[in-house]
Image: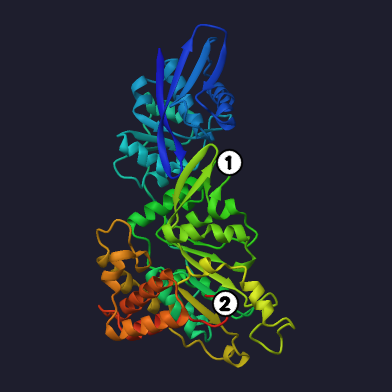
Amino acid sequence: MVSRAYTVAFQGVEARLVEVQCAVTAGMPGFAIVGLPDKAVSEARDRVRSALSALSIALPAKRITVNLSPADLPKEGSHFDLPIAVALLAAIGIIPDDAAETAVALGELSLDGRLVAVPGALPAAMTAAEEDRSLICPAPCGPEAAWVGHCQVIGAEDLGAVIRHATGQAAIPPASPGEVTAPPTDRDLSEVKGQERAKRALEIAAAGRHHLMLVGTPGSGKSMLAARLPGLLPPLSPPEALETSMIQSLCGVLEEGGISRTRPFREPHHTASMAAIVGGGRSARPGEISLAHNGVLFMDEFPEFSRTVLETLRQPIETGEVMVARANAHVTYPCRFLLVAAANPCKCGYLSDPSRACARVPQCGADYLGRISGPLMDRFDLRVEVPPVAFTDLDLPADGERSETIAGRVAKARARQAARFDGHATARQNADAEGRLLEQIATPDTEGRELLIKAAERFGFSARGYHRILRVARTIADLDGSKAVRRPHLAEALSFRLTAQLPS
C-alpha cells in the first residue's frame, strides 16, 4: 500500500505541487528517498527517524521507500522533512490517509521533533489554496501563510502536535494573519539643507517611478537624499504587497510573519557579485533587484560596481523582470524597481572644485564616469548634479517642505496614473508606458512638440531618450494636475536630461 502526502518545490516565486509517496514493503530494512532530491532532502531520513524516535514511534523492520513526484523536478530544501514524516506516519497507520492527503505540508524537523521555520510559506499557501487543500507548517510560518485567503493554515509547534491534530485528539486552531506595522522613520526631506533641484527630482522619480542618477562631490548629500525617497512613496497596494512578500518569503527575509505595506529599500554594497545583485547561485535564488521589486534599489558609488553587474542591469530596467538561467534551473523573477544611482564626478571626487580637484581634470572625470556605458546611462530618466552645501547654509534652520507634504502630491499623481492604466496588462506608472499607449497619454501641445523636436535635433537624443522625456513630462503634468502635457512640463523634463558633466 502506498500512502501520500503533499508539499511544494520552488521554481522562482512559483511553488509547484509535489506528491510525496511512501511505501513500506517486505525486504532488507532501509530508508530510501528518490525523486531527484538534493543533499538536504536526502538527509531528511535521519532527521525524520530521530524525530519519530523522540516520540517513541518505532519504524518497522521493513524497506521504506519515499518517492517525490514528479521525479524529474529538482527537490531542494529542508522543508521536505515534514511531508516525508506525514507520508510515513500514514503508511504505518499512525495517522489517517485522508488527513495526510488533504493538506500541503512543509517544515524542517529538529532531532527532538520540533518544527523549524522554513522560507516559502506564503507561495506554498497560495498553491495549497489553488489545490483546495489546507497547509500544515511550523508555527512561526503560520501568520505569514495565513494572509492567503481560502486556505486553512495550521501552524504546529512540533511533530507530536501534527499527529494529535490529524488524529482528532487535539485540533490546532487555524493561524491568523500577522500584522506588521510600518517601522517609524526619522528621515525627513526637510532635514536636507538646500539641494532644491535634487528634491524636485526625487519627487518626480517617486511619482512616476523614474530612474534617477545623482552626481556630486563627497559629502554633498547624495546618500542622505536617497535614504529619504521611501518616505515619499505611497504604501504598497494589496496586490503589490503580495507580490513583494512572496519574494521576501522565498528568501526568508519576511519579518514578523506578516505582510508589510512598506516599500522595500535595498542598498547593496558595490563589492556585491552579479549573483547577489541579479540573482543566481546553485539554486537560482532572487537577487537584490528582485528584493527591491515595487520599491527602491539604491546603488551608491555606482561606477565602482563591476562592469558586468552594471551591464546586466540594462535588460531588467526595461522589462521589469529577470530570467536567471543555470544548468539545472531557468526561473524568472519580477524586478520592477526604482533605481537610484549615486556617483562622484570623478575618482578624486572634486572635479567641480578647482581648489581641490586633481591635476588630471577633466580626464579624471571622463575616465571615472566612463565606466557607466552610454546605453546604461540612457536608461536614467533624471540626471541631477548635487553641488556641495556651503557651511553657512548648514547653520540655517530647516525650512523646506516635509516629506509628508511631498508624499501627498506624489499620492495624488499616482492615483491619476492608477486610473489611467486601470485594466492595462503591464503599465502601472508612467515609466511603464510605451508605444501607442505613450503617444495617447503624453502627446504634447504644439509649443511643447516644437521644443522637443528642436532639443532632440540639437542634442541628438536616442529614440529611448526621446520617449523617456515624454514619460517624465507626463509625470510632471500629473504633479501639476494637468491633463495635457505642455511646454513647461517638457522644458523641466529636458532640464533633467541635459545635466552637464554627465555622458549622454
Q: Work out which residue is located at the far bottom of the displayed protein and give it.
A: 392
C-alpha separation, residue under disc 2 versus residue under disc 1: 36 Å
Quadrant of res 124: top left
Where does residue 237 sit, x and y in percent of width and height? 34, 60
N-term mark: 2 or 1 = 2
Q: Which mark is residue 282?
A: 1
* Residue 166 percent location from the top left of the image: 38, 26
Q: Which image quadrant is residue 393 in?
A: bottom right
Q: Is residue 214 left or right of residue 15?
A: right
Q: What crowding class fits label 1: few (fewer than 14 Cα within 10 Å), some (14-19), or many (20 or more)?
A: few
SS category of the residue bearing label 1: loop
Q: Nearer the viewer, residue 267 or 462?
A: 462
Q: How is the image coloured?
A: rainbow
Left or right: where 293 falls relative to 28: left
Amino acid on which disc 1 is placed: Arg
Compare residues 120 and 422 and report the one nearer the observer.
Answer: 422
Q: How many marks?
A: 2
Q: Amino acid at mark 2?
A: Val
Residue identifier under label 2: 215
Q: Is residue 429 above or below residue 15?
A: below
Residue found 48% across the figure and 58% down from its top: 315
As rendered, which of 329 and 126 lies closer to the eye? 329
